[in-house]
Image (spheres, rainbow, N blue to C red):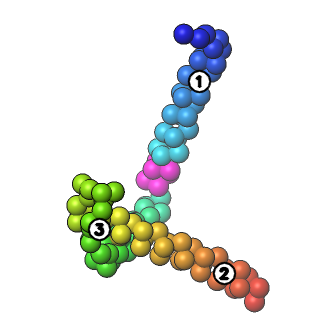
Amino acid sequence: MEDYGWVGGALYIMYILLFVAIASAVILPIIKSLSEPKTLIRSGIGVGIILVLFVVCYLIADGTVLKNKAYEGISENTSKMIGASLLMLYVMFFGAIIAVVYSEVSKFFK
């Protein structure tokens, strides 16, 4: 087995710092939002809109499983979830593009 010297220790330090960064990125906004309830309401509305959008995409998605060896083991529900996820991706992508274009056009006319 090869000895990598200080690289192994540096990797452990990196893992610890990564954990601290992820924990602080999750915990600190929660603490801040608890002190300002209006931000919690806005966040809740945003999450609710995304959930409703996903339900609509799930209802629209096709659950057909193709008869192919590559698709063995995929159920109709799994196929429907994949289709809903792809539809959600498309809707969010085009929504983001529309929002950016709208923002730039509205800045131009102000």
Of all residues, the one furthest to the bottom in this rendering is 109
Q: Main secondary structure of the magenta part?
A: helix
Q: Residue at x 56, y 38 (%)?
A: 21
Residue designated by label 2: 101
Is residue 50 found inside the magenta-colored segment of the image? no
Dot 3: element:
loop
Distance between mark 1 and mark 2 Cα atoms: 42 Å
**In the picture, which quadrant includes the C terminus?**
bottom right
Is residue 34 found inside the magenta-colored segment of the image? yes
Residue designated by label 1: 11
> Crowding at label 2, few (<14), some or many (≥20) Cα neighbours within 10 Å?
few
The numbered disc on residue 90 is none
Q: Earlier in the sequence, mark 3 or mark 2?
A: 3
Q: Position of residue 68 (x, y in %)?
A: 30, 62
> Which stretch did the figure color magenta?
29-35
Looking at the rendered structure, the kind of residue marked 3 is Leu
Q: Residue at x 61, y 10 (%)?
A: 3
Q: Position of residue 73 (x, y in %)?
A: 24, 54
> Crowding at label 1, few (<14), some or many (≥20) Cα neighbours within 10 Å?
few
Is residue 41 visible in the rendered image? The answer is no
Q: Earlier in the sequence, mark 1 or mark 2?
A: 1
Dot 1: element:
helix
In this rendering, the label closer to the viewer, 1 or 2:
1
| Nearer to us in this view, 55 or 103 | 55
Residue designated by label 3: 66
Looking at the rendered structure, the kind of residue marked 2 is Val
Q: Is residue 65 above or below residue 71?
A: below
